[in-house]
Structures are given as structure tokens and as C-alpha cells.
Amino acid sequence: MSHKVMIGVPSQELETSLTVRFDELGDCEIVSIHRSYAELSETLRSMPDLDVLIVHEDLGPLPAVELIRDVARNHPQLAILLMVEESDPEEFTRVMEAGARGVMLQDCTIGELDARVGHAAEWSQTLRRHFEEANADVPASGRRGTIITLTGAKGGIGTTTLTIQLARAAAQAGRSVCLVDLDLQKGDIPGYLDLNHRRSIVDLVQAADSISGSMLGETLYVHPEGMHILLAPRDGERGEEVTETVARQILASLNSRYELVIADCGSYMTDATAMACELAHTCLVTATPDLPALRAGQRLISMWERLQVREKKNVKALLLRHSRQNEIQPDFARKLIGVDLVPTPVPSIFRSLEEASNTGDPRRITDQNLLKAYSRIAAELGVLEAAPEPDLVAPQGAPEADQMPEVPRKKGLFGKGKADKAAKPKKEKKERKKKQKTGDKGAQFVEFAALTPLLLMSALLVWQVVLYGITSMYAGHAANEAARQAAVTPNDLGKITGEASKRVRAPWDNSDTFHVEIDHRENGSYAKAVLAMPVVLPNTTSSWEVSGESRIIYER
């Protein structure tokens, strides 16, 4: 039976060395090779039948012990082998306690490699088989919940309000959702929900590596609408206690218990928010349609990429306070911030949020355009999707039924007391979309029909100006030529007119539309060429005339 192996090594040299040795082993298959824990963790979610994971001690960015503990917590049926340069008894003890199945040297022989991988794979397959027998109806999918983070490009633009509305939408759709306030110094969720709870995220710091269901039950606030909330500390200075490691352990624990974890990361980066963005399945940056906010969002995304927190291609942006009167529209905003935008922006309706913010009751938002926007954004981010398939086994320390309150199904939070749009039949949705498209086409046709006469009139006006310019040019040239000929033959008007007409092209040179006059004044004589002004077409004349004149300098 072939053993499926995944490898995480920091360099191409180690990758080549391991690949060559595995080629000699006929019963082992390398499914993928990764250079960072983020890539490795993402691939693990889609491979429930993986047998062995080989991780080098220098893979990073996490320490090897923390990396192994994190993988073992999320994938208890997976055998993990740590590869080291030199054997160290203390290191061996630490990694075994973290959940590894063994330690091997990076320059081990093919025989040693075969024995280590073979024993680890047999253990993994046996454990998975026992789990399948004990849970015949539960597939070993290895799937966990989804983490969504929201970070504001600036403060005070509505990120917290949007986070709360997404959590409410998830609870309404019947999903188990945990709302986490990671704005550790200035968390505003209690004010927006009018709640008073003495426990916060710092109460989990001391026991972050072994969080139980009873501990979460005491720390989380259960909102009447169904969402569970992990609050920021009341004293902002205590936010420093939530380190990078603590944030990872807390989020991993929540992720193993809830279908959806939504984190409000505030508007500035800390170790905790950086870890949340790194672990998130969806990382969202919110910004308003103005240059300072979009440039701030661009700098934040670039900083994440420089610090290897999150690649730019894995970040989305969402536009808040959108209006058709704004100078910056979504297409231009997407080019400025440099990442994809969530299709639906949040409209600029400040007054509709005022009562809900002042009373701490988000149900006071009654503006249908705003509620529809929140509902569409929730659907586009996958918040309203059905719960994922359950994992093979409950994670270590999962809460019992009597320790974690049941999440009630709520209806009517986004609308007029009816079920959410996500629960409506597909046929009804298709018909509604078809009607919307038909209405849009009709409106576009009417608008085009109304604009067509204006466009035609504008085009005719521009063309008439062109004709006037051409006529003026011919009048000036003809007057110059008439003055030159009049200086030679002052009494022969026919010849003067004939020479002047040579400088005018048809149909302007027609005798009905063109003539030359000699005007004698006190200060001298002038030749004057007069042309009839054409209308729309050059051969269509009007009563208007365009003239040009030039002084005659007689020869002596």
C-alpha cells in the first residue's frame, strides 16, 4: 500500500536530497513540497487521507515545536516527523510532547528513512481506520471552520459595524459563529451591542495552549441573536498580553469549535492581528473612497507582504461609504489599492446608522438599501453558506453539549420579518435576477433614446464651427490675392475677382456665393472678399456672410 507523504523544507538543496532518496522507495508517494508553514497548512486542509508529514526544524516562520503542536491539534490522525541537523535529547522530548511521531536526521540513510516513514504511515492509517469504524457516519475530512478577518485602512470608517452585521447574518443563517474583537486597545464591540461582560480574551492567555470547552463557556458572551463574542480587554494596556503565539492558539481553538470565526482587527497591526491575518481564510481590508484611505490600505497590504504575513494576491478590499456622487468610484479604487474588491460596496447612509450606534442595538437599522448591501456582502464572502462537513474526530478539549450554549436559529434580521435570502428557493432567485436584468436593459434603452438628440445636436454644432473656420480661411486668402491683383490692375474688377477665386475651392467659389469688393477709405483702399456662410453642407448657403479684407498697396 502506497504511503502519502508531504514535505516542508526551507531550501532547494534539502528538497532535492529528500526527493532523490524517496525515488528509491517504491511504496512512498510525495504529494507536495512546501517552503513555508502557511502554504503547508493551506494544503493540509484539502488532503484528509495524508499519512505522513515531514517538517524540517528550520521551516519557519513558527518554531518547530509550535508548528507541530498546531498541526497535531488540527489533524490528530496525521503522523508528523521532525527532521533535524543534529540529534538533541531535549529537543526530542519537546517535539514528542507537542505531538510528533518521531525525529530523524536530515542526512539519514535510505533504510532509516524507509523505516521511519513506514512506521509513521502505519500508525496514521491504523488510527484513521479505527476512527472510521467508531464514526461510520462521519467522513474523515479533516476540515475545520472558516476564519474571516476585517482590518480598516483608517479608524472610524465603519469596520466594526460591518463585522457585527456579518456575524448577525451568519447567526441568522443558522451557522455557529464566534465574533472576536482583536482591536485590543480600543475595542468597540460592547458599545455597538450594548453589552457588559467582565471576561475578555486576556482571561485565556494563561491557558492558551490547553483551552477547554468550559473555559470558553465562561469567557465568551452569548448574544441573544445567536453569536458568541470574545471581547477585547477593558483596560487597553492589557492587550499586550495577547502575543502572537497566544493569538494563534486561541484562534485555532475557536476554529476547531465554530463553523465561522469573524475577527475585527481594528485599523493598526499588532502581533495578534498579524497572526490572525496569516491564519485567515479570507483577509479583508475596508476603505472609504478617498485617496488617504486607499493609500493607507495599499501601505497596509504592502507591509503584510514584506513581513510575510499575507501575500497581496490573497487579500480582498471592500469599499465603505460608497455613493455615485463620489469622485472615486469602485473601478478606480480597485486600481489604487491594488487588490480585488468585494463586488458590493456599503452605501453612504450615515443617518441610518446613527440610532443603532447610539443605542447599541443593530436592529435599529431599518434602511433597506443598507440591509440589502450587508446581506449581499455576507453572501459574497461565504458567510451564509451551509455548514461544512464535520471532521472525523472532535478536537482535543472540545466542549460538551452542556458546556457550550446551543446557537439558536434566528430569522428576520435582514428584512421585514422574513427568512434570509440565502434560504429562498433557487428558482425564485433566478426569476428575480432575470427581472432585474430586464429592467436594467429597459432603463438603458430609455436613457440612450433621451441622449441621442443631444448627441446629434452637439455633433452638428461642432461641424458648423468647422465650416465657419474653413469659410473664414478662404475669405482671408481671397482678400490677400485680390489686393495683390488690384495693385497691378486697379480698374479691372473682373480680373481681380478671377485671381481671388483661384484661392477659394468649390463650392465656395461659386459666383452666387462669392464676390470681391474694392473699398476706398480715407486711410487707403482695401480689397474685400465676401463668402456666403454654408449651413451643415458646404453647398447649402445661408443669408449669413463671412468676409475678409486686405489693404491694397499700389505700384508706382
Image: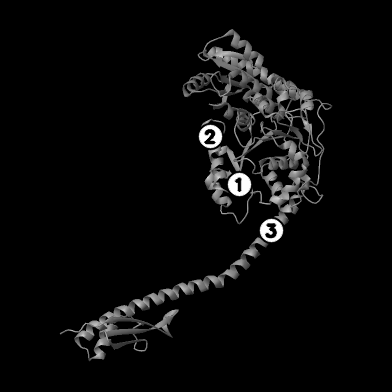
Which quadrant holds the N terminus? top right
Q: Is residue 49 visible?
A: no
Residue type highlighted by circle 1: Thr
Which quadrant holds the C terminus? bottom left
Q: Quadrant of residue 401?
A: top right
Residue type highlighted by circle 3: Gln
| Mark 3, other Cα within 10 Å: few <14 / some 14–19 / many ≥20 | few
Q: Closer to the camera, 110 or 385?
A: 385
Check the image and name the residue furthest to the top: 89
Q: Nearer the viewer, mark 1 or mark 2?
A: 1
The residue under label 1 is: 288
Q: Quadrant of residue 529?
A: bottom left
Q: Marks 3 and 1: in contact by CB < 8 Å?
A: no
Q: Marks 2 and 1: in contact by CB < 8 Å?
A: no
Q: Closer to the camera, 25 or 365?
A: 365
Check the image and name the residue furthest to the front: 522
The residue under label 3 is: 436
Q: What whole-number distance in Å separates the C-alpha atoms at marks 1 and 2?
A: 19 Å
Residue type highlighted by circle 2: Met
Q: Is residue 119 above or below residue 355?
A: above
Q: Position of residue 45 (x, y in %)?
A: 64, 30
Q: Nearer the viewer, mark 2 or mark 3?
A: 2
Check the image and name the residue furthest to the left: 556
Q: Earlier in the sequence, mark 1 or mark 3?
A: 1
Q: Position of residue 147 (x, y in %)?
A: 67, 34
The residue under label 2 is: 303
Q: Marks 3 and 2: in contact by CB < 8 Å?
A: no
Q: Secondary structure at mark 1?
A: loop
Q: Secondary structure at mark 2?
A: helix
